[in-house]
Amino acid sequence: MSDITQRFSTGAPQNLEERFASRAAHMKPSEIRSLFAVASRPEIVSLAGGMPNLSALPMGMMADVVDNLIRNNGQEALQYGNGQGHPKLREQICEVMALEGIRANPDDVLVTTGSQQALDLISRIFLDPQDVVLVEAPSYVGALGTFHQYEASVVHVETDEDGLVPTALAEAIKTVRATGRKIKFLYTIPNYQNPSGVLLPASRRTEILSICREAGIFVVEDNPYGLLGFDKPSPNAMRAEDSENVIYLGSFSKTIAPGLRVGWALVPPSLKEKLVIASESSILCPSNFTQLTISSYLANQPWRDQIASFCELYKERRDVMLESLDEYFPATAKWTKPGGGFYVWVTLPPEIDTTALMPKAIVAKVAYVPGTAFYADGFGSWSLRLSYCYPTPERIREGVKALGGVIKQEMANRKGFELKG
Ligand code: PMP
């Protein structure tokens, strides 16, 4: 092969697996990602993805914000910035967090490329292979993927309709420690959890904080949905009660726009330096352009009213989904009744395998996420996540009706099979 053909050859290099670092073996596409390709076909009602619904965001106003930014402050907006994040935005982030009872110093805020990057950075500085991370059962698939890539061992802790169960947490800590393994942190989503939609009450927050503090385990509080409560404001953030032991993650993805990719971590001062260095090594600095877009939006636009409009839009869709579930799902199915956020978690009779059911749902033109995606240990096969955030109310009704039909048919088939067998 000539030099030039070799250079432009598109075939994969030989022995690629051997050449990768061993951690690359843990980098696998998530169940959700492969599902999205199918679910995004226009004829399918996708109740799978958790995409924010930007139809409530006035695009003309966003265009003005960006236009003014480039015309009046383009030199700064298009330049490299500060590794920790823009100082003005860090101050404004503290004002946003004050809505959930947090009093914070902008110096302790690290701006990240979405809160997903914060999850990666925290994992990078804390997790050695086999270290344990405690998470809710079920938990956010993107966090599980990150912990997995750092070769951590994920241990799920029991939840009920009020979220994480404190006694189960205390028990899990004891059990894991008896095996000699190190627990590095508890990862929790206390508000309108992804995937269950449940809200952790204030009393449980206090109990969980005290269990973790006494056990010397950090709490990573991931809170992208906290301001999206429909019926009443969510309780104060866990970080409001404990500034020493909680690493708080926030994001503008659900309250402004995910395409800007701006999130943050509010960290105990002792952790800041390591996290900033870790972030600089992956991105040098967060984008000044998107940070200043958000900063100008927060300074000049009625952002609280905008969040209220998002809540109205999501509440209407939540109501339609819950009504449709009542109407079209079998009586033996159970589901959560979220007071905010994007998701409903459905539990079916244990003989129904929601991964195996997916092709039949696709034929019926509806998609969801099978429950096993939200567990690190293969559990959850008879549950599924439905998102109501993106489709129109009519499509939600149509999708739930179709899925209810598929599930009822599957249950009838199984019954027939059992009777015959
Ligand atoms: N945490 C949770 C619980 C999420 O649901 C998401 C996005 N779906 C993220 C973190 C990441 O969000 P982003 O990176 O857009 O801030």
Image (tube, rainbow, N blue to C red):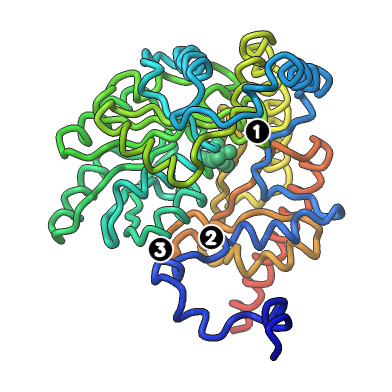
The residue wearing badge 1 is 260
Question: Is 9 placed above or below 256 here?
Answer: below
Pointer 1 local density, CA inside 10 Å: few below 14, some 14–19, many at least 20: some
The image quadrant where one finds the N terminus is bottom right
Say which amino acid is labelled 3. Answer: Asp
Apparent side of residue 322 relative to residue 121 in the rendered image (left or right): right
Q: CA distance from mark 1 to mark 2?
A: 36 Å
Ligand 1 near label 1 (Cβ, under 8 Å)? no
As drawn, the label of residue 30 is: none
Q: Earlier in the sequence, mark 1 or mark 2?
A: 1
Ligand 1 near label 2 (Cβ, under 8 Å)? no
Q: Earlier in the sequence, mark 3 or mark 1?
A: 1
Q: CA distance from mark 3 to mark 1?
A: 33 Å
- Observer-side mark, 3 or 1, equals 1
Pointer 2 local density, CA inside 10 Å: few below 14, some 14–19, many at least 20: some
* Residue 120 placement (x, y as % from top left): 43, 47
Say which amino acid is labelled 1. Answer: Leu
At a point 63% along the width and 72% down the height, the residue shown is 414
The residue wearing badge 2 is 382
Question: Is 30 placed above or below 206 here?
Answer: below
* Residue 252 placement (x, y as % from top left): 58, 28
The residue wearing badge 3 is 377
